[in-house]
Amino acid sequence: RKEVEQDPGPFNVPEGATVAFNCTYSNSASQSFFWYRQDCRKEPKLLMSVYSSGNEDGRFTAQLNRASQYISLLIRDSKLSDSATYLCVVSSYNNNDMRFGAGTRLTVKP
Amino acid sequence: NAGVTQTPKFQVLKTGQSMTLQCAQDMNHEYMSWYRQDPGMGLRLIHYSVGAGITDQGEVPNGYNVSRSTTEDFPLRLLSAAPSQTSVYFCASSYPRVGGTEAFFGQGTRLTVV
């Protein structure tokens, strides 16, 4: 079993749609949680950290359920520019063992 | 601002050749790491370093060596290239603190071993 598992995708949605990605992790000792975005043939970049209380950044909302070892990302009012692969990442407290999910590809269509 | 710089961007090697992928960061980050990204596998940690003179193995270290003589540089050496090492390689750096922090990635090196 992979340490971090994500919805395989791909997700193809129209502009303006709401889309949700799920992620589960197996290491109960994980302390830090992130969503990264990766554009085609580019490097990953931090989208947002995920906190136990849940957090929101504009159209993006991230949730963490430690008991179920589950992380989610909700994107509202999808834009064409949201098309990318979204990577779920978990790590220990000191960030030196980041474990990545395989990513979920999102395509937003006009 | 340069951030994390990787060279080369592309490389083709013959089986058995050796080479070094360069990685440099100008953010004075203590942590640096190397990942490989293969289709359907996500990024997998090869080696990492928590500071100059300190390195450790990640998930997939076999066939690779690293060294960290300075804070800025963290080269990855392929000892004897094999077709299974065909991949995209990313170097990353971050500043450690409780709760984790953002990792900054280089632009990647696309390596093909024939």
Image (cartoon, grey):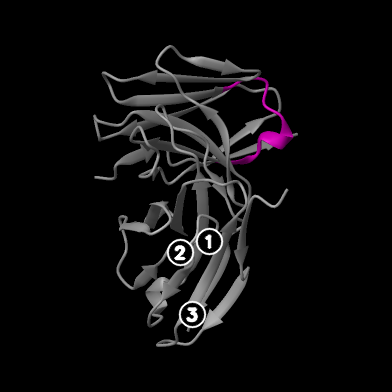
**Element on which disc 3 rests:** strand
The magenta segment is A75-85
Residue in the image at 50% along x and 33% along y: A35
Vertical comparison of A80 with B11: above or below: above
Q: Residue furthest top?
A: A53
**Dot 2: few (<14), some (14–19), or many (≥20) neighbours within 10 Å?**
few
At 58% from the left and 59% from the top, the residue drawn is: B24
Q: Position of residue B100 (x, y in %)?
A: 43, 32
- Disc number at residue B19? 3
Q: Amino acid at mark 3?
A: Met
Would residue A12 be visible to someone looking at this image?
A: yes
Element marked by disc 1: loop
Query: Where, by quadrant of the figure, is residue A79 drawn?
Result: top right
Which residue corresponds to mark 1?
Answer: B73
Magenta segment includes B79: no
Disc 1 and disc 2 in contact, CB within 8 angstroms: yes
> Is label 1 on the same chain as label 2?
yes
Of all chains, the one bearing label 1 is B
Name the residue type under label 1. Answer: Asp
Q: Amino acid under label 2?
A: Ser
